[in-house]
Image (tube, helix red, strand yellow):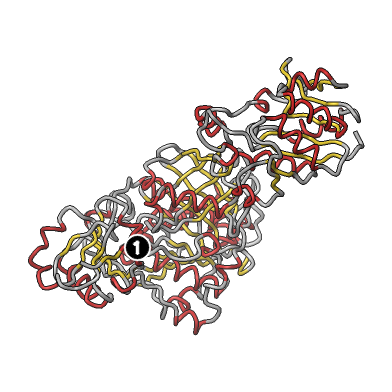
């Protein structure tokens, strides 16, 4: 679709099951909403956040307050359609942090102008991974007034197409975080890296090999290690990334292998 | 066996000892002659030096120097395979000399019955083509590295820790090649070195690593195969797994290396061992998160403010020496006072009284402690 699109990420919902505003709950040290914001940015769009908490301003993106509160996704869509300068809005949610660039790119490419375009994965419809035309604004406003809040209904009743993602996306992408348990499981599914420790470092760690969550770079790795294993604080060691000794900061990728190398003195 | 080119009869005779070496595919007489004219200095005639010497001499290195100021002791014999019971108490280098003079008449061997120092190392190293580091302490390792860097002499580093060993060829092509500081920019601090005393080791480990060093020296001098220049090999005896890491130039650590003989002589290589170190509160708080580390406030009872939230023991300075039994369970004892002066004195005194424990003085004392850790009684 070549029509103009603005991207809105919903985070305003009251999260009864989490007991707190879930977009700011942390996954591996970052607010949950950061993951989808990053993905949107990587696809080339500048996302806006729809939320009702000033804390979201600290994320560095425009934050819109819901025009009418506590109306769920329908309320969020109304806010987005009212605010947009574009012909279409892409509506996403903070609680699907695994959505990939490919899926968003596919959604945009397959979407048809002046229609509602919504992802469907293995038969399940995902209204919050969809593109809606601005022309829906009046219908959405009426729905709110009538208390008709079901997104599925809105979609069915207007010109629409479902975009099947079975072939291009993994099931995990549509994994929706609603409970603290979901959140914990998500933490465990995050990328890890392998660490090999040598000499006195292995001795202090009590193990020669361990896995940790993937840090962004070498300096973050050092910081994480020292926080997790304070016994390393007073030791000097060199770090090698994928068998290369690093002397300056370097980005760390998933499945990278890091070695912690102290000098040996014995002879 | 192929007949050798008979260009010099006596040379051919000399070479007979090495026929199995120069007949090796790709090695040849020319490479053998390079070994014969080479001069190698072995620093340390210990666990690494002994096997390295054995194979270097056997391989036909023409000229070998050995520097070590130590005498043979009984605990050396599990790994320092040149020495036997009859050598106990003798200077190591003298035993080395008499051992090889009996074995190989064609080997020239010079001995230096003392340790390398900042004063003598540049002079001694400059007489050799390649240096083998078989020393057993970081002071010597960094000093020899810096000297070899200045003189652009290839240095074959070998070292061990428990069941692991490291090998690298440093300054392989002079200053453009990585040296020890490109891998490990600065020496560890005294407290990182395990007790500064000898730790246990299976004799075969230095045997393997010292032999690796000899192999690297031979390859480097003969121009045979790939050396570990720009690489760090880490060998694990228990799993027989070797990891080889690539090493590049570390711009930041090049700033730490002396650039001239004058700078070299002015460097401080001493690593205070068994003496007292001053540490910051940041480090102190970090260290105190570990068991077996203890903070002792030696101020008098009336001194304010008091320390809170950091676990500590209060023993006034005058009583510390009578309460040494209080430290029996601890490995590291951190002493603090109001400004860091009394604590330094006390820590120094205690380190002389209690051997095997590490004493630290907290720099700046309670005056330097962040407010969140303080309260007034």
Q: What residue is rendered at 32% in x and 72% in y? A: B363
Q: Is residue A200 left or right of residue A255?
A: left
Q: Is residue B309 visible?
A: yes
Q: Nearer the viewer, residue A12 or B135?
A: A12
Q: What residue is rendered at 37% in x and 42% in y? A: A206
- Disc 1 designates what residue? B372
Counting every numbered tag in the picture gives 1
In this view, A3 is above or below B181? above
Q: Is residue A140 left or right of residue B106?
A: right
Q: What residue is rendered at 46% in x and 49% in y? A: A225
Q: Nearer the viewer, residue A99 or B28?
A: A99
Res. B374 image quadrant: bottom left
Residue B169 percent location from the top left of the image: 55, 58
Res. B273 image quadrant: bottom left
Q: Nearer the viewer, residue B166 or A240?
A: A240
Residue B49 percent location from the top left of the image: 40, 58
């Amino acid at each position: 679709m070549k029509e103009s699109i603005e991207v809105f990420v919903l985070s305003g919902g009251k999260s009864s099951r989490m007991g707190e505003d879930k977009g700011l709950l942390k996954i591996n040290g970052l607010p949950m909403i950061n993951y989808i914001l990053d993905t949107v940015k990587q696809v080339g769009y500048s996302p806006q956040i729809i939320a009702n908490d000033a804390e979201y301003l600290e994320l560095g993106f425009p934050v819109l307050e819901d025009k009418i509160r506590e109306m769920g996704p329908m309320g969020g869509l109304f806010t987005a359609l009212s605010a947009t300068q574009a012909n279409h809005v892409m509506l996403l949610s903070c609680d699907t942090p695994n959505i990939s660039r490919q899926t968003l790119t596919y959604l945009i490419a397959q979407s048809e102008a002046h229609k509602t375009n919504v992802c469907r994965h293995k038969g399940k419809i995902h209204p919050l991974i969809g593109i809606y035309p601005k022309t829906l604004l009046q219908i959405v406003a009426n729905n709110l007034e009538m208390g008709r809040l079901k997104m599925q209904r809105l979609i069915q009743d207007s010109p629409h197409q479902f975009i099947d993602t079975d072939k291009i996306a993994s099931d995990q992408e549509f994994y929706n975080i609603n409970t603290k348990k979901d959140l914990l499981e998500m933490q465990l599914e995050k990328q890890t890296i392998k660490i090999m420790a040598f000499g006195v470092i292995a001795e202090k760690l009590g193990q020669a090999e361990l896995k940790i969550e993937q840090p962004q770079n070498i300096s973050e790795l050092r910081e994480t290690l020292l926080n997790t294993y304070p016994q390393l604080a007073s030791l000097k060691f060199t770090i090698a990334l994928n068998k290369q000794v690093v002397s300056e900061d370097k980005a760390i990728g998933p499945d990278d292998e890091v070695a912690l190398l102290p000098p040996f003195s014995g002879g | 066996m192929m007949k050798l080119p008979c260009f010099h009869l006596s040379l051919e005779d000399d070479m007979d000892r090495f026929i199995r070496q120069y007949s090796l595919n790709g090695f040849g007489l020319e490479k053998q002659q390079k070994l014969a004219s080479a001069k190698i200095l072995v620093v340390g005639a210990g666990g690494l030096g002994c096997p390295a010497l054995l194979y270097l001499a056997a391989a036909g290195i023409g000229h070998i120097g050995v520097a070590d100021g130590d005498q043979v002791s009984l605990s050396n014999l599990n790994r320092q395979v040149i020495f036997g019971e009859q050598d106990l108490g003798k200077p190591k280098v003298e035993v080395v000399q008499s051992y090889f003079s009996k074995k190989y008449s064609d080997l020239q061997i010079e001995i230096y019955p003392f340790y390398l120092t900042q004063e003598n190392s540049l002079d001694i190293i400059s007489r050799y083509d390649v240096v083998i580091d078989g020393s057993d302490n970081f002071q010597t390792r960094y000093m020899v590295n810096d000297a070899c860097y200045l003189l652009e002499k290839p240095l074959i580093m070998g070292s061990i820790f428990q069941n692991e060993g490291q090998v690298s060829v440093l300054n392989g092509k002079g200053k453009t090649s990585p040296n020890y500081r490109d891998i490990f920019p600065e020496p560890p601090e005294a407290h990182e070195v395990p007790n500064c005393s000898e730790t246990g080791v299976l004799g075969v480990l230095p045997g393997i690593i010292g032999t690796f060093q000899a192999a690297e020296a031979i390859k480097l001098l003969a121009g045979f195969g790939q050396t570990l220049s720009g690489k760090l090999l880490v060998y694990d005896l228990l799993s027989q797994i070797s990891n080889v890491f690539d090493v590049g130039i570390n711009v930041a650590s090049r700033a730490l290396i002396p650039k001239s003989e004058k700078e070299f002589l002015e460097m401080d290589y001493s690593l205070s061992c068994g003496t007292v170190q001053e540490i910051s509160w940041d480090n102190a708080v970090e260290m105190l998160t570990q068991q077996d580390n203890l903070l002792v406030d030696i101020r008098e009872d009336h001194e304010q403010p008091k320390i809170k939230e950091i676990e500590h023991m209060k023993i006034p300075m005058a009583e510390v020496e009578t309460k040494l039994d209080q430290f029996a369970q601890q490995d590291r004892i951190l002493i603090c006072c109001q400004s860091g002066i009394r604590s330094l004195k006390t820590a120094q005194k205690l380190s002389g009284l209690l051997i095997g424990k590490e004493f630290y003085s907290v720099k700046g004392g309670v005056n330097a402690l962040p407010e969140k850790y303080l309260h007034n009684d």
